[in-house]
Image: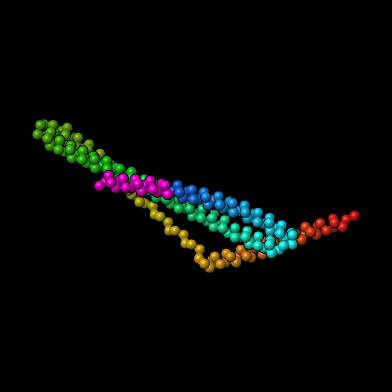
Amino acid sequence: MLDYSYARQQDYLREMREAAVDLGASRNRAGTQERDLRRSAERLRTQAEQAVAAGKDELGRDALRLRADTIAHADDLAAEQAQLRADQERLTEATRRLEARLRALAYQKEALKAAYTAAEARASAEAAVLFGGAYEAADAERRAAAQTEGLQSRAEALSEQANRRQQPAPPLAADRIQEQLDAIGREAAVEEELDRIKKRAGSAAERREPDAHAP
């Protein structure tokens, strides 16, 4: 029964290690997508400036809206990476605890084997008494008992260490009200950015105008 439990926990440990690797791969993919989106956001800003310079304010506004949505998506991916990192760390810690339990279980197995050896030693001692070898048999029994006690103590210490730490509670997701507030904030940022682009374009045009009339 103990051997079966040990084998099952080894299976769980292998699955947990594989899950930790999968989480790391997902975090790397999210990071790549985030970087691509932020580069796209920079291109959209440049395109919005070009549209405003060409007198197409509405096209520039559309580009800035798309840029705001792109940045929001990139921010979501950044948050997802943080969550994946936290999940990976929790899974890694759980893996360490399971490894500690497996070591404790291995000591328990050895303790049972030592106990069986001690039982054999006692049986030999009883036989040795009959044949005059009581001292040697008793010494062998004491050694086997000491080995059993040491292994059992080590197993209990490892089990206590493995169960000491607790899992943190998972974070709560953002609610619908916060999503609406974020959308309003993005729209306001779009209008502010459009105004800044138009002001910069107007200033550039004013600087070019005197040069055009110069003799």
In the picture, measured across the screen, residue 121 lies left or right of residue 184, that is left
The picture quadrant where one finds residue 61 is: bottom right
In the picture, measured across the screen, residue 123 lies left or right of residue 188, that is left
The answer to which of 66 and 208 lies nearer the viewer is 66
Q: Residue furthest right?
A: 215
As for residue 10 lying within the magenta part, the answer is yes
Q: Position of residue 95 (x, y in %)?
A: 39, 48
Q: Position of residue 37 (x, y in %)?
A: 59, 54
Q: Position of residue 189 (x, y in %)?
A: 64, 63
When the figure is inspected, residue 75 is found, relative to residue 20, above or below; the finding is: below
When the figure is inspected, residue 205 is found, relative to residue 24, above or below; the finding is: below
In the picture, measured across the screen, residue 178 lies left or right of residue 131, that is right
What colour scheme governs how the chains and residues are painted in the rendered image of this protein?
rainbow
Q: Position of residue 205 (x, y in %)?
A: 79, 59
Q: Residue at x 60, y 53 (%)?
A: 38
The picture quadrant where one finds residue 129 is: top left
As for residue 123 lying within the magenta part, the answer is no
When the figure is inspected, residue 100 is found, relative to residue 190, above or below; the finding is: above
- The stretch in magenta equals 1-19
Magenta: predominant secondary structure element?
helix
